[in-house]
Every structure is written in structure tokens, then in C-alpha cells.
Image (cartoon, rainbow, N blue to C red):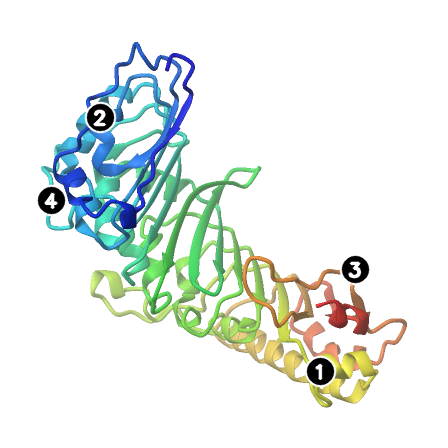
């Protein structure tokens, strides 16, 4: 045991019908720190934490042995969690809590907390209420990376405590934000500093309604000076929640995905709801008044039928492609012109293009890259279509073309 460095314990409930006895009365004596002096990493069911907390631990992952929504595999109380973590608080570098926080109605004393001065990574996956309670009672350095995901369709902004000094310090330091979506989750990534280090990630997973209209405004309630925003891959559930009034200092915006056009429509809005949070209604200006650079990658579904954009690109049907380009440019012109009508100024750079997406979805989804075929090649028939945009941009308008799968790549899929 003296050489043991990592320990993982899992349970197969099918082989242990008496699992409830483990949750109510764990049949393990506490580990002796002297016997496991080199043990730095444990992954164990949360109910066993009191038996495995020793001073040398640096990495702790707690799991719910009875399943995500089972109360029986959760920690008994926040007091017990703090007591167990206090033993290794000085050395603990990472803490992962996977659906193990005590029941939501177990509200500990506001003064109860544990300080983890060496913590570098904190990850919590649970209901919004439990995420908030857990974060409220753990103090950590400003350099700690926070990853927090709610799984009960709770509001994104309800996943973080409004009175946590540690969380608010992370939000205040944020100068760049990325909002990304996959088939089953949406996440907001907060980055800071010249190296773009991620300091906080908060997400929605499982069966969800998507971003709520005020989620981003309330999340950045302390007025983080976010100057760069990336919005990628959102679906129809999330688009209404992309409130650009949450980012009044925005300088650069990158938007990509099949819903990119709908996301851009939110740029052509007034900040009319600016006083909603304090109950005062006042007429605002256009959102993101300092926006300088706009980069857009319109995604379109893989097409194989005649008349579809992908098929037209592969068959050289220029008329279909130009009609699509004209439609997209018209949408951009409408958005930029409406911003001017609201008293805004021209942006200084616009870059846009279109990318075909594979029919496959999931972690192994293939994406188009600039190494794939590109239209146009050598022709400038697109230039008259793009020209109206140049009147609305005080600088370069860069059309990067259509990126699409070649015929042989389709066969390979």
C-alpha cells in the first residue's frame, strides 16, 4: 500500500442488491495516512469520502453510485463534505463532484465554507440549485478553473451563486466569451488574458429548453468587459437567448453554424431592455455600439439532391450558388443597415463565407476545412453581389467562399 498512487472504486449495482447498506453505513475503516503516504488521486462513490480522505490527496473525483438522480448516492451533508476536504485542503489541486451534492433542501449555514488554496480545477455536474449551493461553500483562488454543468433544465444564470466572491472574480476578469452547442449541450466559456486562458465554463446538458432570454445578461451582471465573442453551432432553442446587450464593450464577433443568420438578427436590435434588471424601463441605443470586426461562417447541410446547395457546388451549377450568396448578402446588408439607423457606426471589417456540414453528428463528426474544395476559383462573378456590403463597412469586406465536400469525400463517408 505504501506505493499506491491512484485508487478507483466502482460499483456494479446488478451484482450488489444490498447497495443501500453502503450508502447508509459504509463498511470501510478510514484509510491510514501513513499506510498510503503516496496516494494522490482517488475516484470513489461520494458516500465513501469520509473513509478515503487523507492529507496527501491532490485529486478527488466523487461519483453517485446509484445514478444521476438518486438521492441515496449523494453526500450526507455539506458539513460532512467540508470536514472531509479540510483534511487535504492544503494539497488538493482538483475536485470533481458528479451528481453527488447533498439534497437541494439541505441548506447549510451561510458561514459554512472550506478554503482550498491549492485548487486548480473545480468541476461540478448537478442540478442548478445544487451547483449553486456547492459553489457557495467552497473558496478557491482566482486562478482556479471552474467547470459547472446543470442537468435539470435550470437557467444558466441560476447555476452560479450571485454572492460568491470567487465566482464574481472569474466573471470580472473575463474579456472573451465563447458560446458553443452540441447535439445535447450548450456551454458558455469565459476566457481571460492575452493567452485566452479559460477560467470558467458553465453549461446546460440533458433535456433542456436552451438559453433563456436573460441568461447572458444575468450571468455577466457584474459588467465584465468582454471585447470578443464567439457563437458556434447553436440550434433554435438557444438563438433567442443570445442577448448581445450582455456585451456592451464588444469589439469582435465570430458567428458560425446553420443558425448564424438568425443569431445576426439579434445584432439589429435596440438595447430597449437595458433597465429590466432594476425594474426601470428606458429606451436604449443599438447593442454592441463599439463593434469593429464581424466574422461569419454560414453552415449549410450536406446536399446530394439536384437543386441543393452542396450538389450545386459539386455540379458547377453557378446560378444556384449565386442565388444563395445573394440571399445571405441581403441578410447581412439588412442587419448592418438597421444598426446604422439606430445611431450606430459602420464596422471596420467584415469577413464571411459558407461551409458544408457532414450529415454525421456526434464526437466524430467531420467538418469542412479550408483544404476542401472552394468556390469560387478564379472567377469574380460574386463581386457585384457583395458590393452593397462595402458601403456599410469602413474597411475590407472579405468573402472567403464556399467550402464543400468533393465527390470522393462523400463516398468516403
Mark 4–mark 2 distance (CA, rounded to whole Å): 24 Å
Q: Is residue 162 visible?
A: no
Q: Judge the density around disc 4: few (<14), some (14-19), many (≥20) Cα neighbours within 10 Å.
A: few
Q: Earlier in the sequence, mark 2 or mark 1?
A: 2
Q: Which mark is residue 304?
A: 1
Where is residue 250? Give x, y as percent: 50, 56
CB within 8 Å, label 1 to label 4: no
- Please give the label number shown on residue 100: none
Query: Is residue 187 shown to the viewer in this render?
Result: yes
* Nearer to me, 314 or 336: 314
First in sequence, mark 4 or 2: give its number: 2
Q: Report the residue marked by disc 2.
A: 51
Identity of the residue drawn at 43% across and 60% down:
186
Q: Residue at x 14, y 38 (%)?
A: 77
Earlier in the chain: of badge 1 and badge 4, it is: 4
**Most distant residue in the top direction:** 34
Q: Earlier in the sequence, mark 3 or mark 4?
A: 4
Q: CA distance from mark 3 to mark 4?
A: 55 Å
Q: Which mark is residue 107?
A: 4
Chain-order first, disc 1 or disc 3: 1
Q: How far apart are the two marked residues, 1 and 3, measured between alpha carbons?
A: 20 Å
Q: Secondary structure at mark 4?
A: loop
| Coordinates of residue 200 in the picture (x, y in percent) | 41, 44
Amino acid at each position: 500500500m505504501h506505493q499506491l498512487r491512484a485508487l478507483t472504486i466502482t460499483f456494479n449495482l446488478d451484482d450488489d442488491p444490498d447497495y443501500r447498506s453502503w450508502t447508509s453505513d459504509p463498511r470501510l475503516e478510514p484509510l491510514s495516512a501513513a499506510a498510503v503516504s503516496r496516494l494522490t488521486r482517488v475516484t470513489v462513490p461520494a458516500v465513501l469520502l469520509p473513509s478515503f480522505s487523507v492529507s496527501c490527496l491532490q485529486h478527488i473525483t466523487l461519483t453517485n453510485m446509484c445514478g444521476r438522480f438518486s438521492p441515496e448516492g449523494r453526500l450526507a451533508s455539506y458539513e460532512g463534505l467540508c470536514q472531509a476536504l479540510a483534511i487535504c485542503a492544503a494539497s488538493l489541486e482538483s475536485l470533481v463532484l458528479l451528481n453527488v451534492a447533498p439534497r437541494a433542501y439541505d441548506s447549510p449555514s451561510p458561514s459554512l465554507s472550506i478554503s482550498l488554496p491549492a485548487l486548480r480545477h473545480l468541476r461540478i455536474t448537478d442540478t442548478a440549485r445544487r451547483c449553486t449551493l456547492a459553489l457557495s461553500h467552497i473558496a478557491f483562488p482566482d486562478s482556479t478553473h471552474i467547470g459547472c454543468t446543470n442537468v435539470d433544465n435550470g437557467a444558466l444564470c441560476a447555476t452560479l451563486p450571485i454572492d460568491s466572491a470567487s465566482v464574481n472574480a472569474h466573471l470580472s476578469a473575463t474579456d472573451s466569451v465563447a458560446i458553443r452547442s452540441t447535439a445535447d449541450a450548450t456551454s458558455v466559456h469565459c476566457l481571460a488574458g492575452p493567452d485566452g486562458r479559460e477560467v470558467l465554463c458553465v453549461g446546460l446538458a440533458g433535456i433542456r429548453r436552451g438559453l433563456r432570454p436573460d441568461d447572458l445578461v444575468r450571468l455577466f451582471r457584474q459588467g465584465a468587459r468582454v471585447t470578443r465573442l464567439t457563437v458556434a453551432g447553436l440550434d433554435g432553442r438557444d438563438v433567442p437567448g443570445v442577448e448581445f446587450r450582455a456585451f456592451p464593450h464588444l469589439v469582435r464577433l465570430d458567428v458560425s453554424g446553420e443558425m448564424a443568420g438568425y443569431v445576426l438578427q439579434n445584432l439589429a436590435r435596440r438595447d430597449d431592455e437595458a433597465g429590466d434588471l432594476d425594474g426601470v424601463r428606458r429606451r436604449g441605443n443599438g447593442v454592441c455600439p463599439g463593434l469593429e470586426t464581424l466574422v461569419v461562417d454560414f453552415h449549410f447541410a450536406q446536399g446530394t439532391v439536384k437543386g441543393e446547395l452542396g450538389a450545386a457546388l459539386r455540379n458547377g451549377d453557378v446560378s444556384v450558388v449565386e442565388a444563395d450568396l445573394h440571399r445571405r448578402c441581403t441578410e447581412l446588408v439588412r442587419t448592418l443597415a438597421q444598426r446604422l439607423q439606430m445611431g450606430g457606426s459602420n464596422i471596420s471589417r467584415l469577413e464571411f463565407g459558407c461551409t458544408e456540414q457532414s450529415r454525421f453528428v456526434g464526437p466524430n463528426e467531420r467538418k469542412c476545412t479550408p483544404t476542401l474544395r472552394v468556390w469560387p476559383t478564379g472567377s469574380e462573378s460574386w463581386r457585384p453581389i457583395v458590393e452593397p456590403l462595402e458601403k456599410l463597412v469602413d474597411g475590407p469586406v472579405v468573402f472567403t467562399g464556399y467550402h464543400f465536400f468533393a465527390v470522393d469525400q462523400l463516398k468516403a463517408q
